[in-house]
Amino acid sequence: MTAASYQVPAKVHQVELEVKRSKFLTFAAPAVNRREAEDFIRSLREQHPQANHVCWAYIAGAPNTTIRSMSDDGEPSGTAGMPMLKVLEYSGYGDLVVAVVRYFGGTKLGTGGLQRAYSDAVSLVLSELPLKLKVARTAVQLSYDYAYDGSISRLLERYDVENIEPKYAQQVTLAIALASSELSTFKSDVTNITAGNVEVVTPDAD
C-alpha cells in the first residue's frame, strides 16, 4: 500500500564533510523510479572520475516502496551503502537518491569510522535538503451521460484532483488523478449523486 503523502526532495542539494582529510561530497536528488536514481548516480561518476568511491543509496518511490538499493562501491562491505540506506529509511522521505563521492585523504578510517562518516554525510545533506509534500494519487476514469456533467463538475471542486481530462463524445469520459486517500469517499459520492448509474474505474489498480 502506498503512503498517502510524504516528503520528497524539492531539488538537488549538495554538502561537503571532511573526516581525517578525506572529503565526502554528498548529493541528494529526486528519483521517482529506479532509472532516475541510476541516471543521477551515473552522472556523478562522470563528473568525478578521480574519486576513490561513489557510494549510493535510494528509495525510488513512496517511503515504503520495495524499489530501493545501495552500493559500497569498493568500500569494505557494509560500511557505506547500508548505513546510507538506513538513514534514508529512518527519514521517512521518498523519491530520493543520495550519493557520496569520496576523495581519500591518506588516513584509513576503519570499519566503524567509515560507517559513521557515510551515515553523518547523509544525515547532513538530509538536514539541509529542501523538501516538498507529495500526495499519492490514483488514476480514475468515469463515463457518464451529459445529464450528470454539472453535478460531477461540482463534486470535483470538493476533492484534491489533478490532470482533469474530459472527452466529449456520445458520453462524457473523464480522467483524473485523485488523492489516493480520498478514493473511497469519492466513489461513494459519485454513486450517491448519480443514483448508482456511474462507475468509478481505476485502470491502474491490480
Image (spheres, rainbow, N blue to C red):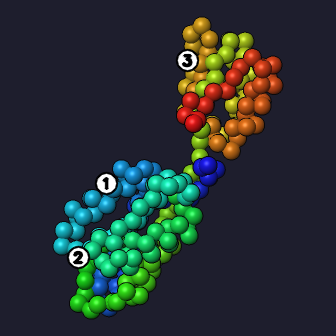
The residue under the point 33% across, 56% down is 38
User: Percent position (x, y) of residue 68?
Assistant: 45, 59
Q: Quadrant of residue 14?
A: bottom left
- Tell me the amino acid under the disc marked 1: Asp
The residue under the point 22% across, 74% down is 51
Q: Would you name the residue on which mark 2 appears?
A: 52
Please state which of residues 199 and 144 is positioned toward the viewer in this rendering.
Answer: 199
The residue under the point 64% across, 23% down is 142
Q: CA distance from mark 2 to mark 3?
A: 55 Å
Q: Relative to 151, say whether 160 is above or below.
A: below
Q: Quadrant of residue 115?
A: bottom left
Residue 39 tag number: 1
User: Percent position (x, y) of residue 170?
Assistant: 60, 7
Q: Earlier in the sequence, mark 3 or mark 1?
A: 1
Q: Earlier in the sequence, mark 2 or mark 3?
A: 2
- Tell me the amino acid under the disc marked 2: Asn
Q: Secondary structure at mark 2?
A: loop
Q: CA distance from mark 1 to mark 2?
A: 19 Å
